[in-house]
C-alpha cells in the first residue's frame, strides 16, 4: 500500500555512533547480568559478581601449605618463616606477588595464591530445572553439605499465563476493531458522545475501577476465573486499542467501501473481508503491545486471580519467589528469565511490524 | 442466490414475530452456551496444558461467534432496521464492557470515597481530608509526583535522543532493538534484575553491580534501596526509565521518519546546524506525537505499582498511591480510603484528559 521514497540520510557520524553505543551498552547490561546469573550455580552467584565470567585478573590458588596441627590460632601464626595474625590470614595477606589466605582453619591449611588471568566459567542449567519442575532438588554446597530445595513449579503458571494472555489480547482487539469501524464509517445516534467517552476513559487509571469490579466479580463468582480476568484486561485495554484502530481505520480510502456496498456487501462482510486485512500492520503492532502489557501485568492478576496456585500467572509466581526467597538469586534470575522468554520471542519475531503499524496510525503522509 | 432480488423483497418485509423471537433467542442462546462453558472451565480439573489450550480456543472463537450470530440476526431484519441496528451491534459490546468495567466503576468509586471503611456510613469529605493529612499517604502523593515528573521527563527526553541518534547511526536496527527490549520484560522480572544490581551484602564481597562499581571508584558500598529520601525513589525511577524509554523511542522514531526529507534538506541548505534543525523543525512537526507519548507515560507512571511492590514493598518511604491503595484495600480492608486514593489519582489525570481531547479536536479527529 504505502510507497515510501526514502532519501538517504546522513549516516554514521562517529560522535553519534559513540553516544548511541554507550546508551546501548548501559541499556543491555542489566539483562546481560540476569542471563549470566541465571546459568551460574547457586553458590557461585552468592560469592562472586556475574561479571567475573568475563576474563579478568584474579587470585588463583597455586599451592597449599599445611600448618602444624598444634598451631594456636589465637597467637601469631608462623607460615613459611613469617608471622601473621589470624585476622590477616582471614582477609588474605600479600607477600611479594603472592597472597596467603586460609583455605580451611580447622584443617590448618593456607592457600598460596597468585594473580592470573581467569574467568569463572562454571555454568549450569540446574536453576532452570528447579524453577520449572517444582519438584525437590538436592543442591551440593561448595563445603560438601547437601541441601534440599523445593522448586517453584513455574510450568503450571506458564500455561495459566498463556490461557490468560492470548484471549486477553485477541478479545479486546476484536471488540475494539468492530467499534472503531462503526465510529469511523457508520452513522448512528450518539456516535460522537460515545467516542468522546471512550477517549476520556483512555486516561482513567485502572485503580479507580478495581473496588467496584471486585465486588461485582465476587457476586457473580468471577473471581479467580479466566473469563473474569479476560474481561478485566479487555476493558482496561479497550480505550487505547479502540483509539489506535480508529486512527488506522478512519484513514482508509472511502471509495473502497462504497464500491463494496454497491456490490451488496454487508457491513460485516466489508469489515471482515476488507477492513481487517487492510489493517494488518496496525493490528500487529497493537497486538504486540497488548500482548506485552497483559503478559507483564501484575496488579490486575493479583487482584482478580487471588493467590491460588491453580490459576497463578508467571508474574505472580516470581513476585512470590521474590517475597519468600529474596536471596535465592539462582532461582529468581532463572524464573525471571523464563518469564521473559516468550515476550522477547514475540517481540523479536514481530519487530518489523512496529514501525510500519505505528506509522499507519500516528503519522499521516 | 439472487442478491438484488432478495434486497427488494427485504425492504418490503415487516418485523415478523419470527424476527422478534430470533432477536431474543440468539443472544439468550449465546449467553447460555458461554455460561455453560464458563462453568465447565471453573470446575474442571483438566491438566494445565489442555486447560490452557481449550481456554484459548474458547476465548477466540467465543468472541467471534457472538459477533457472527448477532450480526446474522440483524441481517434478517428489514433494510431500514438493519441499517439502524448494525452500528449498535458493532459498538455495543465495547460500550457495554467499558460501561460495566470502567465508566460505572469510576462513578461507584467516587460514591464509595464518601463512605467509611466498610461502606456503611456516609462520612462526607472526611476521607479526602484524611488522605491529605495522613503522613504516609502524603508521602505516597509526593512520591507519585516525583515519579510522574522525573520519570516522564527522563523517558521522553531519552526516547527523543535515542530516536534522533538512531536515525543517523550506522546500527539503527540493533540500537533500537536493544533500547526497546526492556519493554518486553515484566516489571516483576525487571524488579529481579534491578534488585540484583542494587544488591548489598554488608561487609562481604559485593555481587551487586552498582556496589562493585562504587568500590572500584573507591567509595563504600551502600544499601541503595533503603537510603534516605529522595535517593531510593530515584533509584526506583531509574527502572521505569530503563523500561519505558523504548516505548517513547519507537513512536518518536516513527514520527521522525515521517518528516519529509526535503524539509530538512532545505534547512541544511540554509546553513542551519543539526541542533537548530532539531529544535526549530523536527520538534514542532512531531509535537502532537510528543504530547501523545507524554500522556501515555504520565498515565502509566501515575499508576505505577509493580516496581515499588517488588523492590521495596513500599518501605523506606517509597510508597506510591497505587501501593497505598492496595494496602488500604486488602490489608486494612478500608474501601473508603482505597476509593479516595483512586479518585485522587483520577483528579490528577483530568488535566491530561482535557489536553488530549483538545488536541484531538484540533487535529480534526473528533
Image (cartoon, coloured by chain):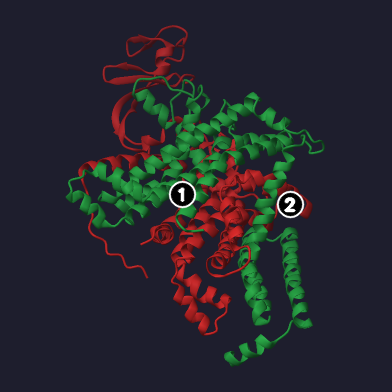
| Residue A191 image offset from top left, x and y in percent | 60, 63
Out of B47 and B67, give the one closest to the viewer. Answer: B67
Q: Would you identify the image quadrant in which residue B5 lies? A: bottom right
- Label of residue B292 in the image: 1
| Residue B91 image offset from top left, x and y in percent | 62, 65
Q: How many discs mark residues in the rendered view?
A: 2
Out of A121 and B148, give the one closest to the viewer. Answer: B148
Q: Is residue A40 above or below residue A133?
A: above
Q: In this image, A300 relative to B198: left or right? A: right
Q: In this image, B32 relative to B356: left or right? A: right
Q: Which residue is mark 2?
A: A217
Which residue is found at the position 42% from the left and 61% from the top?
A357
Q: Which chain is red?
A: A
Q: Is residue B63 above or below residue A48?
A: below
Q: In this image, B121 relative to A10: left or right? A: right
Q: Which tint was used for chain B? A: green
| Residue farthest to the top, as pictured | A75
Q: Is residue B197 above or below residue B221?
A: below
Which residue is found at the position 37% from the left and 28% from the top?
B213
Q: Secondary structure at mark 1?
A: helix
Q: Is residue A86 above or below residue B52?
A: above
Which residue is found at the position 65% from the left and 36% from the top?
B341
Contact between labelled residues 2 and 1, with CB atoms less than 8 Å apart? no
Chain on which label 1 sits: B
Chain on which label 2 sits: A
Amino acid at each position: 500500500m504505502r510507497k515510501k521514497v526514502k532519501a538517504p540520510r546522513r549516516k554514521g557520524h562517529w560522535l553519534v555512533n559513540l553516544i548511541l553505543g554507550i546508551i546501548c551498552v548501559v541499556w543491555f547490561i542489566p539483562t546481560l547480568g540476569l542471563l549470566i546469573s541465571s546459568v551460574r550455580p547457586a553458590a557461585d552467584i552468592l560469592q562472586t559478581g556475574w561479571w567475573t565470567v568475563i576474563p579478568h585478573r584474579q587470585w588463583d590458588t597455586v599451592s597449599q601449605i599445611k600448618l602444624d596441627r598444634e598451631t594456636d590460632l589465637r597467637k601469631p601464626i608462623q607460615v613459611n618463616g613469617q608471622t601473621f595474625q589470624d585476622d590477616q590470614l582471614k582477609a588474605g595477606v600479600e607477600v611479594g606477588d603472592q597472597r596467603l589466605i586460609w583455605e580451611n582453619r580447622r584443617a590448618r591449611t593456607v592457600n598460596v595464591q597468585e594473580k592470573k588471568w581467569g574467568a569463572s566459567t562454571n555454568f549450569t542449567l540446574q536453576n532452570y530445572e528447579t524453577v520449572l519442575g517444582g519438584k525437590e532438588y538436592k543442591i551440593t554446597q561448595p563445603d560438601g553439605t547437601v541441601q534440599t530445595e523445593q522448586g517453584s513449579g513455574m510450568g503450571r503458571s506458564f500455561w495459566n499465563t498463556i490461557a490468560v494472555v492470548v484471549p486477553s489480547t485477541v478479545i479486546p482487539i476484536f471488540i475494539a476493531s468492530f467499534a472503531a469501524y462503526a465510529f469511523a464509517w457508520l452513522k448512528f445516534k450518539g456516535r460522537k458522545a460515545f467516542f468522546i467517552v471512550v477517549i476520556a476513559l483512555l486516561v482513567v487509571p485502572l485503580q479507580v475501577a478495581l473496588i467496584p469490579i471486585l465486588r461485582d466479580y465476587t457476586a457473580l463468582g468471577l473471581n479467580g476465573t479466566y473469563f473474569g480476568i479476560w474481561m478485566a484486561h479487555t476493558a482496561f485495554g479497550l480505550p487505547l486499542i479502540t483509539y489506535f484502530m480508529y486512527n488506522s481505520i478512519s484513514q482508509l480510502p472511502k471509495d473502497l467501501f462504497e464500491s463494496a456496498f454497491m456490490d451488496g456487501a454487508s457491513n460485516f462482510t466489508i469489515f471482515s473481508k476488507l477492513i481487517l486485512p487492510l489493517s494488518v500492520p496496525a493490528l500487529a503492532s497493537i497486538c504486540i503491545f497488548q500482548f506485552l502489557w497483559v503478559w507483564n501485568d501484575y496488579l490486575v492478576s493479583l487482584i482478580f486471580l487471588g493467590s491460588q496456585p491453580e490459576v497463578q500467572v508467571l508474574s505472580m509466581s516470581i513476585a512470590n519467589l521474590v517475597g519468600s526467597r529474596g536471596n535465592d538469586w539462582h532461582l529468581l534470575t532463572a524464573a525471571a528469565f523464563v518469564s521473559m522468554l516468550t515476550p522477547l520471542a514475540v517481540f523479536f519475531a514481530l519487530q518489523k511490524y512496529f514501525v510500519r503499524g505505528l506509522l499507519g496510525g500516528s503519522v499521516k503522509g | 442466490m439472487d442478491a438484488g432480488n432478495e434486497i427488494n423483497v427485504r425492504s418490503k418485509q415487516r418485523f415478523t414475530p419470527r424476527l422478534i423471537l430470533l432477536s431474543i433467542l440468539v443472544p439468550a442462546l449465546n449467553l447460555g452456551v458461554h455460561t455453560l462453558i464458563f462453568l465447565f472451565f471453573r470446575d474442571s480439573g483438566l491438566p494445565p496444558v489442555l486447560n490452557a489450550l481449550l481456554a484459548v480456543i474458547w476465548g477466540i472463537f467465543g468472541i467471534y461467534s457472538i459477533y457472527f450470530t448477532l450480526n446474522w440476526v440483524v441481517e434478517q431484519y428489514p433494510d431500514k432496521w438493519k441499517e439502524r441496528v448494525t452500528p449498535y451491534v458493532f459498538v455495543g459490546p465495547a460500550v457495554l464492557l467499558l460501561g460495566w468495567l470502567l465508566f460505572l466503576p469510576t462513578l461507584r468509586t467516587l460514591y464509595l470515597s464518601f463512605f467509611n471503611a466498610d461502606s456503611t456510613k456516609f462520612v462526607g469529605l472526611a476521607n479526602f481530608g484524611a488522605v491529605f493529612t495522613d503522613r504516609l499517604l502524603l508521602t505516597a502523593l509526593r512520591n507519585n509526583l516525583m515519579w510522574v515528573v522525573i520519570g516522564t521527563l527522563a523517558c521522553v527526553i531519552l526516547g527523543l535522543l535515542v530516536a534522533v541518534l538512531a536515525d543517523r547511526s550506522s546500527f539503527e536496527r540493533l540500537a533500537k532493538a536493544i533500547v526497546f527490549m526492556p519493554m518486553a520484560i515484566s516489571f516483576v522480572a525487571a524488579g529481579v534484575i534491578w534488585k540484583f544490581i542494587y544488591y548489598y551484602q554488608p561487609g562481604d564481597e559485593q555481587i551487586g553491580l552498582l556496589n562493585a562499581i562504587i568500590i572500584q571508584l573507591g567509595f563504600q558500598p551502600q544499601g541503595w534501596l533503603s537510603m534516605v529520601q529522595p535517593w531510593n525513589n530515584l533509584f526506583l525511577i531509574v527502572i521505569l526509565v530503563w523500561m519505558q524509554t523504548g516505548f517513547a523511542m519507537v513512536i518518536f522514531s516513527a514520527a521522525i521518519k515521517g518528516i519529509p526529507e526535503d524539509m530538512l534538506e532545505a534547512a541544511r541548505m540554509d546553513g542551519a546546524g543539526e541542533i537548530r534543525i532539531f529544535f526549530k523543525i523536527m520538534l514542532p512537526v512531531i509535537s502532537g506525537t510528543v504530547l501523545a507519548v507524554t500522556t501515555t507515560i504520565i498515565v502509566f507512571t501515575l499508576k505505577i505499582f509493580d516496581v515499588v511492590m517488588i523492590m521495596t514493598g513500599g518501605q523506606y518511604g517509597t510508597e506510591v498511591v497505587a501501593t497505598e491503595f492496595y494496602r488500604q484495600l486488602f490489608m486494612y480492608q478500608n474501601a473508603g480510603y482505597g476509593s479516595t486514593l483512586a479518585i485522587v489519582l483520577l483528579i490528577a489525570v483530568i488535566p491530561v484528559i482535557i489536553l488530549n481531547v483538545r488536541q484531538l479536536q484540533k487535529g480534526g479527529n473528533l
